[in-house]
Image (cartoon, helix red, strand yellow):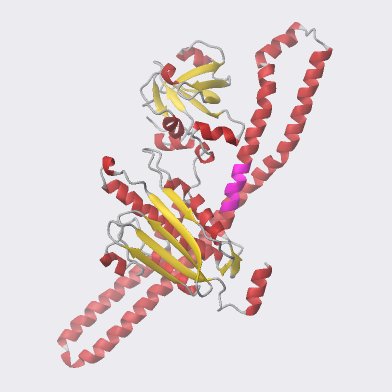
């Protein structure tokens, strides 16, 4: 189908997870992700009446009659689960198709579980992770570093040619080559540090800006919901008092009451306000997680809750952990220990979590694509373990049950610009930058893996950073 509302059919199905579209024959031709998951049988191509029942308005099941009621509020019932959907019918004249855009009619979190629905199903996710990798791939400093590396490689080849011609200068040339190699490695490290600093600054500003822009209107809505609730209750009481005091209603008023379905509105309005309050709570939770991840205001070392950083990272990567097409979501198992607050650069440690968990997801996705569908029996899983170990240090282990890493790849895993991904898919800086961040904290980053048995990345950092001054540690603790 052609794009609708400026969106492709795939993005349209994600943006409106509870939508569907019907043609003049009342056949379903398009459906949202969540409805497709809830209705187990194939829904596209089936008849409307096989999957849904119109509760209100009371009309005959006919394309033209539904089209003429496009301004009415529709209440539908899913035949297989008796779940109710509430929304509006929208007519597309170009294709002669009617879209139903709506949402489940629920007023309590407890009602979601029996329907197999979670809060995350109500809307698409913010593509912040995509922005992160776009910044990595298009960074000007990275292009300059690759160009300089190519020039240095050319110089090495020329130097080796000169060594073969002038054997009497072999020892001097070998010494120069070593110095050049050290300079090259130092240059790579310097370039990766510059890229990391620029990227973290841009990402932090992006995440914090998005969180701020979402938070302001959400607080405005949330702060006024109590007043709306109070005003609504008072107005409904007033209507009830009028009905009790004047039981004989004039015909024109009675006609209007019937047209607007006053009894239904009186019961539904408080439920709508409760649903809006639940939605605002969810948005505020997401904004808090984005702020915890960005840590834009924490450039110095501070005492940090490691588990909060992991949870914020998982929230941002939530859309990549889901696989709506075949119910093969990636399961995250959390074995959290009793960790104290850790003195560190919170934004940089969160970046390490982002790189390691993203690599685990990519490994599991690669395994899923390489195996036949019927062979994908093993549940894709990422296990995150935290604990306090000896010498006042904490350990965070992130393991996956993917294809594992070969010894040859493992030997170069933390080298700058080394990547096994296709051209344009990876920069080879994620693990190298993570390694340098952990080293900067006085810690160690290691990888344990065997082909066919998954991979585990383990990072250990001290609870208290001894390189910081006593004044910095006191200030951090008081903050």
Residue at the right extreme of this rendering: 245
Q: Residue at x 53, y 54 (%)?
A: 312
In the displayed structure, would residue 441 be above or below residue 163?
above
* The C terminus, quarter of image: bottom right
- The image quadrant of residue 322 is top left
Task: In this rendered view, identify the residue nearer to me: 463 or 210.
Answer: 463
Q: Residue visible at 57% across and 28% down?
A: 105
* Number of residue marks: 0
Q: Is residue 238 magenta?
A: no
Image quarter of residue 183: bottom left
What percent of the width, then of the height, locates residue 64? 47, 13
Q: Is residue 205 visible?
A: no
Q: Which residues are magenta?
A: 281-289
- Counting from the top left corner in percent of width and height, residue 84 is at 54, 24
Q: Main secondary structure of the magenta part?
A: helix
Q: What's the residue at 39%, 65% (across, down)?
A: 431
Q: Is 371 left, or right, of 197 in this rendering?
A: left
The percent position of residue 143, horizontal first and vertical second, equals: 37, 65
Indicate whether 427 appears above or below 218.
Answer: below
Q: Is residue 125 left or right of residue 427?
A: right
Question: Which residue sits furthest bottom?
Answer: 168
Residue 306 is at least partly visible in this image: yes
Image height of 21 relative to 62, above or below = below
Residue 138: x and y in percent read 41, 59
Q: Quadrant of residue 181?
A: bottom left
Quadrant where the N terminus lies? top left
């Amino acid at each position: 189908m052609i794009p609708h509302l400026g969106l492709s059919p795939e993005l349209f199905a994600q943006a409106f997870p509870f939508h569907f579209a019907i043609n003049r024959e009342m056949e379903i031709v398009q459906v949202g992700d969540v409805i497709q998951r809830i209705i187990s049988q194939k829904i596209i191509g089936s008849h409307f009446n096989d999957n849904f029942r119109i509760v209100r308005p009371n009309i005959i099941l006919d394309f033209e009659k539904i089209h003429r009621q496009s301004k009415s509020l529709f209440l539908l019932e899913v035949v297989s689960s008796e779940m109710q959907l509430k929304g509006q019918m929208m007519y597309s004249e170009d294709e002669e198709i009617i879209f139903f855009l709506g949402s489940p009619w629920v007023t309590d979190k407890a009602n979601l579980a029996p329907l197999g629905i979670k809060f995350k199903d109500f809307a698409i996710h913010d593509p912040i992770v995509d922005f992160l990798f776009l910044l990595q791939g298009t960074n000007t400093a990275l292009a300059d570093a690759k160009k300089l590396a190519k020039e240095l490689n050319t110089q090495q080849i020329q130097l080796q040619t000169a060594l073969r011609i002038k054997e009497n200068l072999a020892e001097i040339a070998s010494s120069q080559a070593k110095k050049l190699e050290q300079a090259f490695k130092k240059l790579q490290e310097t370039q990766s540090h510059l890229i990391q600093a620029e990227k973290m600054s841009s990402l932090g500003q992006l995440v914090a800006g998005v969180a701020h822009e979402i938070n302001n209107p959400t607080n405005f809505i949330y702060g006024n919901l109590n007043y709306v609730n109070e005003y609504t209750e008072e107005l409904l009481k007033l209507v009830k008092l009028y009905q009790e005091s004047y039981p004989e209603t004039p015909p024109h008023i009675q006609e209007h009451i019937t047209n607007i379905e006053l009894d239904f509105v009186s019961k539904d309005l408080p439920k709508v306000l409760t649903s809006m309050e639940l939605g605002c709570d969810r948005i505020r939770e997401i904004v808090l997680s984005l702020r915890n991840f960005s840590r834009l205001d924490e450039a110095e070392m501070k005492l940090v809750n490691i588990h909060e950083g992991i949870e914020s990272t998982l929230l941002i990567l939530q859309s990549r952990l889901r696989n709506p097409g075949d119910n093969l979501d990636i399961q995250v198992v959390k074995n959290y220990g009793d960790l104290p607050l850790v003195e560190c650069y919170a934004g940089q440690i969160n970046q390490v979590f982002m790189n390691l968990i993203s690599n685990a997801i990519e490994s599991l996705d690669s395994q899923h694509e390489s195996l036949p569908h019927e062979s994908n029996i093993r549940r894709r899983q990422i296990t995150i373990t935290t604990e306090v170990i000896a010498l006042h240090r904490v350990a965070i282990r992130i393991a996956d049950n993917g294809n594992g890493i070969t010894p040859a790849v493992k030997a170069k895993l933390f080298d700058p610009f080394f990547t096994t991904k296709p051209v344009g898919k990876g920069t080879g800086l994620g693990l190298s930058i993570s390694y340098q961040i952990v080293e900067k904290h006085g810690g160690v980053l290691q990888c344990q893996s065997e082909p066919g048995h998954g991979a585990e990345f383990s990072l250990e950092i001290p609870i208290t950073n001894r390189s910081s001054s006593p004044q910095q540690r006191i200030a951090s603790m008081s903050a």
